[in-house]
Structure formats: C-alpha cells, structure tokens
Image (cartoon, rainbow, N blue to C red):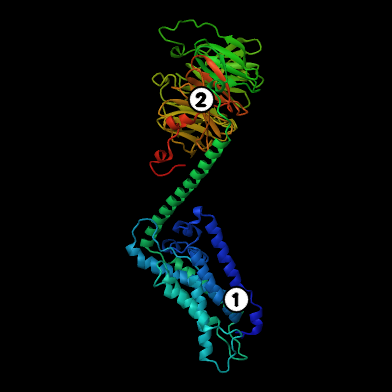
Amino acid sequence: MESISQEQSTRSLHLSILLIVANVAIFVLMWWGMPGHELTNETLIAWGANFAPLTLTGEPWRLLTSAFLHGGWTHLLMNMYMLAVLGPILERTIGALRFAVVYLLSALGASLLSAVWFGYHEVSSFVSVGIHPVVSVGASGALMGLAGAAAAVCLRYAMSRRGWDEPPVPIRSNAIVQVIAINLVSGFFISGIDQAAHVGGVLVGFIVGMAVCRPQRKGARGLGQAGVVALGIAGTIAIVAAARHGSNAELDQWKAEIDNQLAQSRLKAEREQQAQAIAEQVKFDAEHRPPFVSTDVAKGTVLPVGKSPYAMALGPGGKRLYVTAMDDNTLTVVDVEKRALVRTIHGEPFATGLGGCPGNMCRGRGAAGLAISPDEGYAYVASMREDSVVRIDLARGTIVDSVKVGRFPRTVIASPAHDKLYVFNGVGDSISVVGLSQWPKSVKTLSLGGSAQADGMPFGRTLSMWLSSDGNTLYAHAIQKNAIVAFDTATDAVVHTYPVDSGFLGAVPAASGAGVWFYSQSSLDWMDPAKLTASRNNAVCHGGMYDVDTSDDGKYFAVLDYDRPLVRVFKAATHGTMGEYPVPSAPEQVIFAPDQRTLYALAQEGTVSIVDRKNSADYTRDETENPFFCPPSQASGGDDNE
C-alpha cells in the first residue's frame, strides 16, 4: 500500500465539499417542491428513504439514496456541520479514494443495520394505521463511519508509532468526539433518532478504516488503489446482496400494505393539487370573464324553424344551418352570417293521418336526422318519407328521390369520404348502410342485436352513433344489449362490444377525434376515443334529463336542461360555468359553431337561437342554487374528487 504522504494530500478531490453541496442541493429540490414546504414520510419514501418493508423486499437502492436525504433544515445543517468538521481533515489524511470508499460502505452498512433492526424488531408490533414512523434518512450513518475510520487511523498510529510515517494532517480527537457524541448522545434525548444506523455506521467505518487507512512502515508496500476499489465494490455487492435476501413473509405483507397506503397517499396528493389548480383556474376565469348582459341580449337572435324541431346540422362551409321539424315535416335553411331564414323545404303529405297521436313522433315519421353533402348541393333527411331517407336538391329546394331503409330512421351520418351514409333506425334497432354511388339503394343492414324490433324500448330515446376520426370504425348504442357496438366499416363486421351503465343517455364525439363524451343521469365522462375507457369522470347531481354538445377540441361542453329554457356552457377542465343563455322554450338540441364563439340552440316551440358566447346572462345564482356537477365531497363519497 502506498504511504499516506503529503503528495497524496495535495491531490485530494475535495470530495467532502462535493458531498455537502450534493446533500444541500437534493434537500432544497425536495423541500421546494412540496406544498407548504412540509416534508412528510410519504415524500421521503418517494425520494428514496430507507424503509425496511421496501428496502428489504426488492428496493436495496434505498440503502444509498437515504443517505442523501434529510428530514428538515435542522437535520441537514447539523449533519453538514459534522461533515465540514471531520470530512476535509480525514480526506486530506487518507486521500479522496479511500475517503469515498469509507463514506460509501459506511452509508450502506448503516442503512442495512437500520433496515434489519427495524424490519425484524418492529415488524412483530406493526399496526397498519398509516405509515409506520421508522422512515430513516440522513447522512449521519456515513458520518459515523467517517468518525470510525478516523478512530481506526488514530488507533493504528498510536499502537505502532515507532518506525511508521506520521499522518501529514493530524486528526484531532475532538473532531471525532464531536461527531460521535452529537449522533449517539442526541439519540437518547431526541425522539426519531436512528441509533441503529449510527451504530452500523461507526462499526463499518472502523472496520473499513482499519483495512484501507492504516499508515505503512517506511518503504513497505501493501494494499494499493486497485485493492481499495476492489474492496469498495466487494463491500457494496455484499451489503446489497444481504438486503436483497433480507425479506420474509411478514415483511412482504407489510410491503403490500405500505404500497397500498402510498398509492392512496399519492392519489390524494394528486387530487389535492388538481383541486388547487382548478380553483385557481376558476378564479382566473371569473376575474377575466366578459361583463354579464341582460337576458334580452343573452338570448341572441331567435328565428322560427317549424313545429317540433328535431335536429340541425351546420353546413361544411359554416355559413348555413339546416334544421328539420318533425311535425311540419320540413327542412329550414338559415344563413348564420346574416342571421336570417333562407328558405323552408316541405316534404309531401303523409298518406295516413295521426291516428290519435299528438304528433308525427309517435307515428314514427317526420323530418328527423340529416347529413349535408360537402358542396352543400344535397341534404339527406331521414323520415321525411316514412321509413326512408330523402335526397333534397338544396339549390332548387325540392326532393329528388329517396331510399328505403329500416323502421323509423332518426339519425344520419356520412363517412369522411362521403361515399356512404349510416342511418340509425330507431324502431328497427338497426343501421342501414347506404352507398351514395349506388343511390338509391341500401347496401347493408347492421343489426344491433336483441329482437328484430325495438318497439318496447323508449320510443324517443337518443340514437347515439358516430364514426372514428379515420372513418374505419362505426360505433352505435345498442339499447337491448346495453352496450356500444363497434363495426369495422370495411367489412361491416362487429369488432367489439363495450358495456355501458344502465343510466346511459347518449354519446357526443368531439369533431377533432380527441375523445367522446358519455353522459348519463349521474355522470358526464370523457372517454378515450379508441378504447372507450373513461379518462375523466365528472359526477352529475342535476337529477333530470339533459343533452350535451361539445366543442371540437372537447375543452367546453354545452348542457341543455329539458325542464328549463336555457343552455349552460361549462369548461371541461374545471367544471366552471362559462356562460348561460336563455331560449324561448325547453331546448331540444345545441351545437357549437366551428369558431367555438357561437352556439345554436333548438327549442321545443319551433325556434332556433343563435347566441354569442361572450354575451352571457348572470349565472352566479344558478351555480349556487342549481349546480349541474356534484360538489367534490359528494362526488367522491366524502373524501376527495378530481
């Protein structure tokens, strides 16, 4: 071994200073990132604290990481003071390499003895009420190892002073005594001190110090730097291996319980952070919203569109709105830029009367769902002729022809390429596929399962049907299966069935393809468009029937209440109300304009309202007296909520 010379001292890498900087930097990062700068056991464990049920059951890296964590400023400053007192002196005496090996093995050994002591001594009395308090952090185990190594150097020199080189930098006994006294004595007076780590550190440090730090007789050669490195590697492997084989059945059970507690704590912390962020965003939105306007201004422009309006669609050009009215059996064209009626196109009279029905709905007929061609040359309207889809020449305002489909078709959507129409037959509980190149011919009928007809099902129910953004998958609500059925549009085969809740009301896809809103009487959920799994759940305490539409990006949604003559707009991320707009009677349908700044709302008494979102009536009272979403405590059963 090389003698410990002045030359070795001057080549020191000042590792002590680097360790102090690392410890302080890690603590500041951890402390700064905590709400209220409060360090909890959960935080320390997340950052790598030594905790027997985790360290001894597959996470041995905690043996080292815990030595760079501290539980508070006092803990940190005390340890860094001791490192500053003893570290530089010992490092200059034995060199940076030996110092590093002593520090590393002492930290690992101290953490191992702590984990074994608390894991096997405390596990028998463990009570699963929160996280057990024996969460060990701090550099004191490694510092005790430095003190042990320093003691070994002094002891070796004292026992063999004659004929041996003297250490170039004398190690003062008071520095060793300070470190050992502060750590050991404080453990008898301050609760929470890990004495097992202190004992383990000083023992390992002394042993390693005797092996690598002893002065050598003049001219003698012994353990060199390669040997010191080898000892460091071998010692690390041995300690880690001991930790990896230190588990037992009780510790495994303890780990499972702790993992569950930590998962719950993380979830709670995430929700609290989300709630705080939402509250801040709601406050920001409230402070920056436009001034409220009178109800007369908020209602916008109101136009008549026929008796019992059923559906509306905005033309691809975004300048015209097309509205069907079931009882009048009409299609009304609205110029949305001028906010004026362009024309009303009438269907032929039906061959039979109402037969005691109050309107066409219960007779299963009357203009219903519609689709518009890309050039706005044609409109395809369901049930303007019974059990058919008619084609209307929009320039001439006349019905050209029709195609026979299933019983009482009420929803029509076109493929992205506009080469097919998908027609949802309400009573037939089926989907007719109409090839526009083969018009007028229905090329395929897709059954949604169950009986051939859905006569016993709610007659006026929402018929939810939509296409994936690439047009490769067709989704439809099969009420008799209580599920969403997915069809491959190339083969028309069923590729998947997704069960839905019994209270499911409908689905509204975002035009961007980012997701789909599923709504029921108890929830409004944002679904992954491919898997139809909920990525965001929103508990609804409205209690009645309602309908929704979403902005193209899914960031806002409009809610209409069938029992109240108004439309409310909410921000999806915060549940905050962004606007409230009165309509002349109970609303039937609402859609966003592509610019997201305008809403179109159909009302039961035969009107369409065109409203500017910036012109909202005062909704603050409604937020308190008629909340749409459940309060967080009620939504989550009394704990917390997104």
Q: Residues within 10 Å of mark 1 (few under 14, many from 20)?
A: some
Residue 123 drawn at (x, y percent): 35, 64
Residue 136, visible in the rendered structure: yes
Circle 2 residue: 567
Identify the secondary structure beneath mark 1: helix
Cα distance, mark 2 to mark 1? Answer: 73 Å
Q: Earlier in the sequence, mark 2 or mark 1?
A: 1
> In the picture shown, does residue 356 fall above or below 180?
above
Instruction: Say what amino acid the circle numbered 2 marks.
Output: Val
Identify the secondary structure beneath mark 2: strand
Residue at image location 63% in from the left, 10% down from the top: 397
- Give 132 or 177, whichever is nearer the viewer: 177
Residue at image location 39% in from the left, 71% down from the top: 189
Q: In the image, 436: left or right of 352?
A: right
Residue at image location 46% in from the left, 48% down from the top: 267
Closer to viewer: mark 2 or mark 1? 2
Instruction: Say what amino acid the circle numbered 1 marks.
Output: Leu
Circle 1 residue: 97
The quadrant of the image that shows the N terminus is: bottom right
Say how many tags the image has: 2
Residue at image location 54% in from the left, 56% down from the top: 32
